Every structure is written in C-alpha cells, then in structure tokens.
Amino acid sequence: MLVAIGIATFGFLTFKDNLEAMRRASQENISWSASQLERELTRFLDSLGTSRAGTASSTVDINQRFDVLWSRVAVFQRGAVGARLRAYDTDNAVEELFEEMKRQEVPVVSIKSFDFTSMANISSAFFPFGAGLHELSRKIIVGEEQKAAEIRAQMRDSADFALYASILTVVMVTGALVYFVYEGQLYRKLADENKALAEKFKAASEVKSRFLTMMSHELRTPMNGVLGLLALARASELDPEQKERLDQVDRSANRMLGMLTDILDFAALENAQFSVTDKPFFSNELLLALPELLGPVATQAEARLHVAAEGELPVMLCGDATRLRRSYALLVTYFLETAGARDIGLALTYSNGVLRARIEVDYVGGGWTPDLIFGERSTNADSFAAEALGPSVARALVSKMGGKIELGNTEDGKILLQIDVPVSALVPKQLKVQLNMQSAPMEIVCKSSVAGLPVDFVSTDSGRQAEIILHETGAKEETAHIAEIRAQNPNAKVFGIGRPQNPELFDFVAEMPLEAAQLRNRIVEALE
Amino acid sequence: MTRIPKMMLWLTAVLALAAPRIALAQGAALTVINSVNGSEVMLTDEELMALAQATINTENEFVDGMTAFVGPLGRDVLALVGEGGSIVVLTAVNDYAVEVPLEDFINYDVVFAMSADGETFSRRDKGPIWVVYPMSDHTELQDPVYNTRLIWQLVKVEIK
C-alpha cells in the first residue's frame, strides 16, 4: 500500500513537472521581440539615410520610424516578456539605447526636410547601438534555444519517469492480485479445515455429553436404590455406633447423588437444546424456598444461614425461577460443604429489571481462596476440581439467563458474591375466585392453599363473573350443575376438588388430601 | 496619425463608389477592407471611439498584471464592411501582418483596444490600436498561437 502511494505521489509530481514544462514551452517566443528591436533600429537608420540621400523618406517617415523604435524599446519595460528580455541584457544595451533616444527626441521631432547635417548627427548617435542590439539578439536566440532544449529534455525525462512508474504500478498490481488470489485460496482451505474440525469437535462433544447424561442417569438409579434401602436400615433398631456409621453413609450417598445431578445439569448445559424458560413467579415463594432447600445443608455443616429480602421486592416476577433457585442453591451449598463457611447471608434485591442476590460469606482459615473458583483463573482453567462442578453449573446457568457473577469483598472483609440476573417485574392482576364448597372446613383448606396469591373471592350471588371456580365434587346431578356454572361464567376455569365421577367435566382436578403447591401452580398459570 | 498615400486615397474613392459607403474620414486611424465584397472604410480615432465601447479585464505576457482594456469590439468594426470572407489580415504600422480566422471575432470578445487602465495608447507604446484577446477568461487562449495575434499599432484590417 505504501509503495502504491509512493508511486502515485511520484506520478503526480511527474505530471506536475510536465505541466510546468508545457507552460514554459507555451511562453511567448522573445527571440522575435529582440530581433524586432534590432530590425526597427535598422529601419530608422535607413529612413535617415534615404532622407540624406534626398530620396523618398520624409521627416514624417523618420518620426514614424522613431515612434515604432520607441514602442519596441517599451516592450522591454513591461510584462513577463519584458522581464525575460531584460534578463538577457546584461550589457544594458537597450537601456543605453533608450537614454540616447530620450536625448535625441527633440532633434528627431524638430528635424527639417533636407537638414542633412542633423540627419547625419542623429544617425551617428544611433549607429553604434546596432552591434550591441545584434549581440543581444544573438544571446537571446542562443539562450532561448538552450531553454527550449532543456524543457524538451525535462518533458522527455518526465514522460520516461511516468512510463516507468506506470509499468511498475501494473507489475505491482498484478503481483498483488496474484498474491490476493493465493491468500484467498489459502484462507478458504483453512476455513474448510476449521469447519471440519469444528464439526468433528461438536460431534465428539455431543457424544461426550450423551455419555455423561447416560452414565449419570444410570448411576442415579442404583444410587436411589441404595438411599432407599439405607433409609429402611436407618429406620430399624440400631445401636448408636451403627446409627452414626449409617448416617455417615447416608451423607456420602446424598453427596454422590448431588454430584450426579450436577453432572446431569452440566451435560444438559452443553447441549444446544438447553433453553431458559421465563414464567411468572412469586418473589415470596423464591424467598421461602431457599431456606427450606438449604436449611438442612447448613444444619449438617453446622453453619448459620440467613435468607432475606433487602428492601421491597416486586410481588411477582417473570423469569426462570427453577434455574434461579438452583443457581443460588449450588453456590451456597458449595460455600457450606466445600469452602467450610460458618456463616452465610443471602439477600435478594430488585432494581431496574435486575434481581440481585448478595451472598456474604464469613470464612476463616484454610488455604482456599474464592478466586480459585469464581475468579478469572477459574474460567480459563483447562480443568477443575470435582468440587467446583456445582459453581461451574451455577455460573453457566446464570450466563444462560443473561446474568453475571462478580466476586468481591464486603466492607467488613467478608467474601461477597454478587449474582445479577435480568428479571422483569409483573403487576399481578386480582384473580376472581369463586368457592363452591359443601363444608366450611373445605373452604378454609382451599383458602389457605391460595394464601398469598392476589385473589379476590367472589360469592355465587354477587352477580360478578369468576375467573377460577374451585368446586368440591361428589354432589348429585354434578353434570347439570357444572353446565349451569359454566353457563353463568363462560370464561371461567373450573377446578374440581376431590374425586369426581366425571373428571372430564373439569379443567383440572385436585384430589384430596389437597396438594397446595399443585393447586397454587395451576392458579399462577391462570394469572399468566 | 496615419497618412494614406495619394494613390491609395484615389483607389479607395473609386472603390467606395462601387461598394456600400459607410464612412470616409480624413486622417484615418484604421482602414477596414472587405476584399470579398469590395467594401472599405477608413475610421478616425473619434469615429472608432464613437462606436460602442467594450471593456475586458485580462492579463497577457506584455502587461503587468490584470489590465482593463477599452475599445470597440473587433466584430463591430468588421461589421462596418459587411459580410463575407473567413480570414482577417491584421497589419501594423511597421507592415507586420498576421492572419486571424474570422471565427475568433465571433467566438471571443476581441477588442480593438485604444486605452489600457484609462490611458490612451500612443504610437510610442501600442497605439493607436492594440488587438487584445480576453485571455484570462478563456484558458485556451493562453497559447503562443494567440500571443502572435496580439498585434499592436494596428492600422489596417482586411477580410479575405
């Protein structure tokens, strides 16, 4: 590129030189002007001579010749032509002639016919200038010829340079084209090879993922069997030593089961079909689920766990609550089980569309540092320890949800892990729920199942349309009754509570004993 | 002032009888002849100045910088002797002559300048008339071909 710019610059300068040379070549030929001056002096002297000889020339003719000679001298005094002429007149021949003309002006203008003496005097005064003007003409002719030769040589050189530059440019462009074609082919070949390698790697990775999934699944099945039998064994009469040993076995088995679950998750995350499912959920449920999930782990690790909301959380959020819960659980579990934390606080805050979990860990002792797992090094590591599997899964889950994990310290020196995940806040509508219960206790059970949800209970005789109708099944003429209810509430979903004779009459059936979570989930779906 | 030989005056008078007579002035500064149709006109300084005067601002190699030249347009002067011909022969007081295509006077505002920057030409300079091309307005005129057509001390114009 630099060479091409250099050639272009050189070509431009050459072109400019050519233009300058052409401009100089197009200047007025001053040789003619010089010869005209010499010629007019001769003609003036001739007019004086013929007059002295008594022939045709008159005093008018003499004056006219004098004027013309004067005008030729004037050419030397002005313009570009005058400047160039003066440059050659190093002997001041023209200037001296002009001085003499000014001295002889009065005698010439006042000359009388047949005043041969004056004519002879004037002629004698001007005659010596003939040789000087002749020499000046010769110098100008020779000088101009030399200049013309120089200009021709310069134009020839410039043309030659331009030709060489053009040839060089053509050669370079041709070379560059050949090079680019060669490079293009090379890169295309490399791209094809890379593509083949990538496909090969992808296929291998998928095989590995499938193997991991299959193996962990296959291992979980007998492990569940082990845990089941272990639970039966622990339920039998045991002496304290046997109970302690079986407790230890149970903890190890549960941990192994947890690792198998992590492996399953890890394999699933590597699968391209893995996707995040955003659904509405109650922030309060997330907040309550975490101590329920992590409390036993903290108790077993003899550590304190505090879960709370900082500030007011939106009642309802939209995100992947299952993956959020799992991410927090994996991280807290890691701190409890592997890092040996004694005190963990998990606080949730919500601001500008981001749900932030602040995990503060009071950690003392040991050679473990959090950046081994959560710092830059861990993400670039070629391998990681088995205990880092949980945090890796959590990090991948958070990333899949569009969030990030940052490691830092609190002001009082605790480890601070900050998990930010974009989650939108929803303003839940009031769901109109009608209870068709045959007994007061059943009504209490149903109401407690939906406690905390944005529910507005409407009575049958209020005249207001219901959106959800919880109907206790088992009454007589149920088919006709349900048809009547649907006619009165055409947009409502009718949930049967109990064990109906015709389940197909209902949109959903919740059998007794009532599973509150199941019923709540159905109502939350209706809220969507 | 141009002095026309007696023979020339006689000849002009004879020709004028046969050709459209426009002017025949005493002490003519410029003689204009159309050899194709036989017209001839002799104009004094005053008659030349009585024609519509044009001003062109231009540079050339014989003046210092931009100069305002004033005089009648060449084509106006040529029109005095009628149509016909394609070549114009311009002759100076020292008998120097140059041939110019008639198109020059049609395509460009060629001026028969009688003054420059307000100063009337004397014979000791370029007077009485200097043929000036508008070279600054037309770069194609900045060429030696046109430099040779800048004839001064013009006394005769002949269309052939």
Image (cartoon, grey):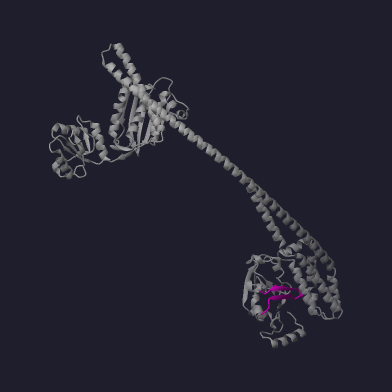
Splitting the image into 4 quarters, where does residue A227 fall?
A: top left
Q: Is residue B95 magenta?
A: yes
Whether residue A9 is visible here, answered yes or no, is: yes
Say whether residue B1 is left or right of residue A229: right
Region in magenta: B84-102
Whether residue A361 is visible here, answered yes or no, is: no
Position in image of residue B7 (x %, y %): 77, 85
Say whether residue A415 is left or right of residue B64: left
Q: Quadrant of the C terminus of chain A?
A: top left
Splitting the image into 4 quarters, where does residue A134 fall?
A: bottom right
Q: So how many labels did they put on this image?
A: 0
Say whether residue A367 is left or right of residue A96: left
- Closer to the camera in the image, B10 or B69: B10
Position in image of residue B6 (x %, y %): 77, 85
- Closer to the camera in the image, A325 or A191: A191
Question: Where A265 sits versus B27, above or below?
Answer: above
Question: Where A307 sits versus B28, above or below?
Answer: above
Splitting the image into 4 quarters, where does residue B141 fall?
A: bottom right
Name the residue located 26 percent from the left edge and 17 percent from the top edge: A235
Position in image of residue A96 (x %, y %): 80, 66
Q: Is residue A377 magenta?
A: no
Position in image of residue A291 (x %, y %): 30, 27
- Closer to the camera in the image, B156 or A327: A327
Question: Where A107 sits versus A465, above or below?
Answer: below
Question: Where A355 sits versus A263, above or below?
Answer: below
